[in-house]
């Protein structure tokens, strides 16, 4: 089932890009050139909506898990995102399990309607700004408009062939899609000063040369676990509803197990406003 799903995604990319796939000249000669171009790739983008497939390979257990869902990213009135997963595939078995993650600029909500679990954590002090997709900070390394110098302060950067880093059998459909689409791969490894702070040992991001928006991202952590995020059916500047980014705490009579936390140190006791 996992291979079939990823194969379907690879065919989406193949059908849309076969004409430009063969022997294309590299759009950028160095990682510095690509990073410079990426700084303005998000100009005019207020929202980004796409489908998402998240595949994880666990080094010790050897397990493969995959989740399918959708991502909404918005820059107005601040950077925020909402990710909803509708199904999980474990050991080739599809399990309908909804999981929702919402960041509204200050609060991160993790919600499981199946288990009626609601965890709300303040991760940004009121009035401060935070990029939820910044490489090394957010849940997924999908940088949009991040400054090249900020990336280079933390990482060594180099360009890599499209299929590089996708040798595992579980990633072969993604490898074919990246090669056929002519995506540009940026490989990042932590600099010594940042290596002690991060759990990551490697980050790879693939960009579509036509619009320089990310299409795929892969990380490896210090335990050897690999995580691949595949984005498809991207739509820019679609309308969004405020409810899609709601972090409202459920009422006591709604049957949720609610946990409230504060990781900012802004207050000794959490003050939650619905």
Image (cartoon, helix red, strand yellow):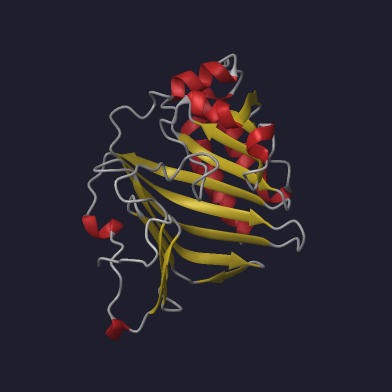
Closest to the observer: 176 or 134?
134
Res. 163 image quadrant: top right
Q: Residue 88 at x, y = what percent?
A: 54, 66
Q: Residue 272 at x, y = what percent?
A: 30, 66
Q: Quick check: 147 above or below 6?
A: above
Res. 107 image quadrant: bottom left
In the image, is 142 to the left or to the right of 71? Answer: right
In the image, is 85 to the left or to the right of 183? Answer: left
Closest to the observer: 166 or 39?
39
- On-image quarter of the C terminus: bottom left
The answer to whether one can see residue 245 in this image is yes
Residue at (62% x, 50% y) in the render: 227
> Total number of numbered labels?
0
In the image, is 240 to the left or to the right of 169? Answer: left
Closest to the observer: 268 or 74?
268
Q: Residue 187 at x, y = what percent?
A: 63, 31
Q: Residue 68 at x, y = what percent?
A: 49, 58
- On-image quarter of the N terminus: bottom right
Q: Quick check: 14 above or below 225?
A: above
Residue at (29% x, 43% y) in the render: 78
The answer to whether one can see residue 27 in this image is no
């Amino acid at each position: 089932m996992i291979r079939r799903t990823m194969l379907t995604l690879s065919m989406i990319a193949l059908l849309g890009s076969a004409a430009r796939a063969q022997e294309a000249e590299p759009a950028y000669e160095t990682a510095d050139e690509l990073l410079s171009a990426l700084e303005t790739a998000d100009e005019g983008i207020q929202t980004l909506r796409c489908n998402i497939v998240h595949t994880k390979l666990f080094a010790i257990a050897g397990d493969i898990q995959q989740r399918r869902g959708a991502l909404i990213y918005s820059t107005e009135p601040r950077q925020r995102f909402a990710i909803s997963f509708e199904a999980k595939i474990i050991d080739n078995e599809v399990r309908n399990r909804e999981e929702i993650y919402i960041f509204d600029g200050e609060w991160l909500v993790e919600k499981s309607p199946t288990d009626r679990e609601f965890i709300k954590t303040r991760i940004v002090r009121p009035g401060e700004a935070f990029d939820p997709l910044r490489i090394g900070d957010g849940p997924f390394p999908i940088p949009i408009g991040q400054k090249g110098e900020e990336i280079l302060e933390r990482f060594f950067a180099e360009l890599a062939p499209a299929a590089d880093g996708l040798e595992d059998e579980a990633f072969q459909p993604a490898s074919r899609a990246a090669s056929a689409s002519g995506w540009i791969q940026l490989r990042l490894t932590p600099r010594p000063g940042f290596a002690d702070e991060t759990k990551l040992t490697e980050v790879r991001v693939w960009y579509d040369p036509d619009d320089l928006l990310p299409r795929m991202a892969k990380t490896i952590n210090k335990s050897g676990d690999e995580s691949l995020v595949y984005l498809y059916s991207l739509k820019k500047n679609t309308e969004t509803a405020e409810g899609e980014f709601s972090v409202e705490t459920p009422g006591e009579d709604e049957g949720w197990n609610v946990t409230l936390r504060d990781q900012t140190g802004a207050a000794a006791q959490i003050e939650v406003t619905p």
